[in-house]
Image (tube, grey):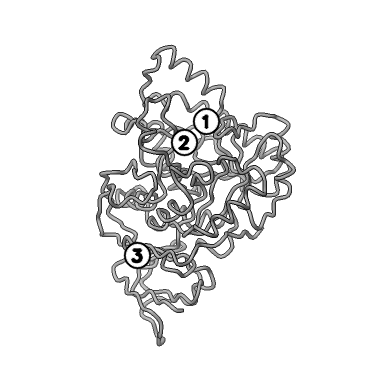
Amino acid sequence: MKTHLTNATVINEGRRFLGGVVIEGDTIKTIYEGRPEFPFDGETIDVTGKWLLPGVIDDHVHFREPGATGKADIASESRAAVAGGVTSFMDMPNNNPPATTLERLEAKYARAAETSLANYSFYLGAGNDNLAEIKKINPQTICGVKVFMGSSTGNMLVDDGKALDAIFEQSPVLIAAHCEDELVIKNNLQNAIDRLGDDIPPACHALIRSEQACFRATGKAIDLAVKYNSRLHILHLSTAHEVRHFPQEERITAEICVHHLWFSDEDYEQSGNLIKCNPAIKTIDDREALRKAVFSGQIAVVGSDHAPHLLQEKQQPYLQAPSGIPMIQHTLPAMLELCRRNFFTPELTVARMCHAPARLFHIRKRGFIREGYYADLVVVDPDAAYTVGKENIYYKCGWSPFEEQQFHAKVTHTFVNGHLAYHNGRFNTSRQGQRLYFER
């Protein structure tokens, strides 16, 4: 089957031009500028006035399956993903049971093959005692190893020094690290309890999971990567201090998440635990430094850290409310809204959310609009303003920290491997996404 997207404003690889794309099967057959000079016998979709972008690749999500499917699952969150222009995702291992063996990891792949509307990959979780599993990874079929450096989620803290050294020395794939120092956090939390008892306001989250906690663990990860020449990717930088001291090492990269580019600690007063996440959303100065790092290219990847919880869980007091925010449906619209406010450009957004993840993870034939590449494509109407509300949220948890926020750019079509998976609020689940492969 052929599909012709015509009269598009194509935004790709730093360029913007009027043209179109011909999709044949699951790949991009033809890209042209101007008007087509060839006959066409397939379906034609006229996207006059709209932008055509590569599909977003999200390197950092928590889809909660297995173990917490009351909050989210691969089927529900992949639907939300394509509604937001995300065509590929990489899911974290802190499940129940945790994905710390290749057998458990392959069970997740099998489940995604049945239910995921988007393309998918899954990290193997690192522990103190699973080096043998890590060494057996096929680098062409698994995106990376997730290491919780100093702070645990789902009992996956790697706190044995010898185990950490061995992982950094011997992992055959990229190491993705969550960097927060558990001792600093525990001391800060105890100080808050001593001062405030159980009545800790959400705004204290930025002080409890502090700049020091982040920087200490980030520094440790970088030192290990330098020592062993490891391929390290640090997730969700959240402080100006980390940005200022981030090394210019080709093998050491980082991600910044959209919520750290959008919110600041001033938003806790209104949003409270709804924006409680780890690492914490911090000061306006931190947010400004993160925005500058994304703009300059010092930090190449923008992700979501999509981590849904039920609304009733988030409405509990601070000490009981879990950390994590549902984000994946709204990361691209939020970034394009920041473009409208002149912090970024659409070309730069495509570079950080599509090209950079494909390049840094060496993903095979995705992340760019190129002939012969998979037809993972997103059509965006830059002038279709809408307000985020319960009626247009596709997360299984049913809420978003962006509720009542107006976005001016709207995803209208999302193609996954040439399949029109989403179009103006409707999903076509007749085909599933594909497993990502890596050229390493």
Seen from the viewer's position, the closer of residues 267 and 315 is 315
Q: Residues within 10 Å of mark 2 (few under 14, many from 20)?
A: many
- Closer to the observer: label 1 or label 3? 3
Question: Which numbered dot is residue 423?
Answer: 3
Q: Quadrant of residue 183?
A: top right
Q: Position of residue 12 (x, y in %)?
A: 44, 64
Residue designated by label 2? 238
Q: What element carries label 1?
A: helix
Q: In which quarter of the image is residue 38?
A: bottom left
Seen from the viewer's position, the closer of residues 242 and 435 is 435
Q: Position of residue 129 (x, y in %)?
A: 71, 36
Q: Position of residue 425 (x, y in %)?
A: 32, 60
Residue designated by label 1? 214
- In this picture, is 240 found above or below 79? above
Evaluate if marks 3 and 2 touch, with contact meaning CB atoms under 8 Å apart. no
The amino acid marked with disc number 1 is: Cys
The residue lying furthest to the bottom in this view is 39
**Residue placed at 38% from the left, 55% from the top?**
84
Evaluate if marks 2 and 1 touch, with contact meaning CB atoms under 8 Å apart. yes
Question: Which numbered dot is residue 326?
Answer: none
Q: What element carries label 2?
A: loop
Where is the C terminus found, in terms of image quarters? bottom right
